[in-house]
Structure formats: structure tokens, C-alpha cells
Amino acid sequence: MKKLMAALAIAGLALPALAATRTVTLVVPGMDCPVCPITVKKALTQVPGVSAAVVNFDKRQAVVTFDDAQTDVGALTASTKNAGYPSTLVGSPP
């Protein structure tokens, strides 16, 4: 019985933590030309864990899907800021 319990405990430790896929919308007010979304999308998709980024020039927004075990909103906004386009999470103060 002790061996079974030990094996189950080890197996439980070996399982990776289950990550959740999240989708957030970022406001990117600094996009002032139709080419800007290309730079913003490139910056976002280079963040580890990002699986999709759709950037809308007319709305000045980016919808980003990512693995929350690999990245977070702070890393996403940092990537756009580093590309020259500061962003904030929709609903957050600027």
C-alpha cells in the first residue's frame, strides 16, 4: 500500500500544472496609421505563450489569446510599449 501511495504521489508531482488560455483586449491609442497594427501584432506574437493577436486599427485595439502559464497582461503591454505603442487592458486606467 505504501508503494502505491508513493507512486501516486510521484505521478501527481510529475503532471504539469494545467494552464488556461486567456483572451484579453488591449487599447493601443498610439496607432496613427494603417501600418501600425503590423508592428503591434509582431510585438505581441513574439511574446512566449501568445497563440493569436488580432489588431484592429479602426478601434485602436488588439485582441490577444495567450497561455497564462507562460505570460501575463504585463508582458503583453510591455511588448507593445517596447515597440513604441503603449497599451492598457480594456477597462483599466491608462
Image: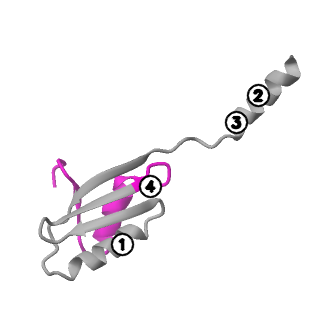
Mark nearest the camera among 2 and 3 is 2
Q: Secondary structure at mark 3?
A: helix
Q: Residues within 10 Å of mark 3 (few under 14, many from 20)?
A: few
- Of labels 1 and 3, earlier in sequence is 3
- Look at mark 1 in the image and give the residue it sits on: 43
Residue at (87%, 23%) from the top-left corner?
3
Task: Give the Cα distance between marks 2 and 1.
Answer: 42 Å
- Of labels 1 and 4, earlier in sequence is 1
Report whether 68 appears left or right of 16: left
- Look at mark 3 in the image and give the residue it sits on: 13
Residue 30 falls within the magenta-colored stretch: no
Q: Are marks 2 and 3 in contact (CB under 8 Å)?
A: no
Residue 27 vs 12, above or below: the answer is below
- Look at mark 2 in the image and give the residue it sits on: 8
Q: Secondary structure at mark 1?
A: helix
Q: Secondary structure at mark 4?
A: loop
Image-quadrant location for residue 58: bottom left
Q: Residue 65: x, y in percent?
A: 37, 56
In magenta, the rendered stretch is: 66-94
Q: Amino acid at mark 1?
A: Ala
- Look at mark 4 in the image and give the residue it sits on: 71
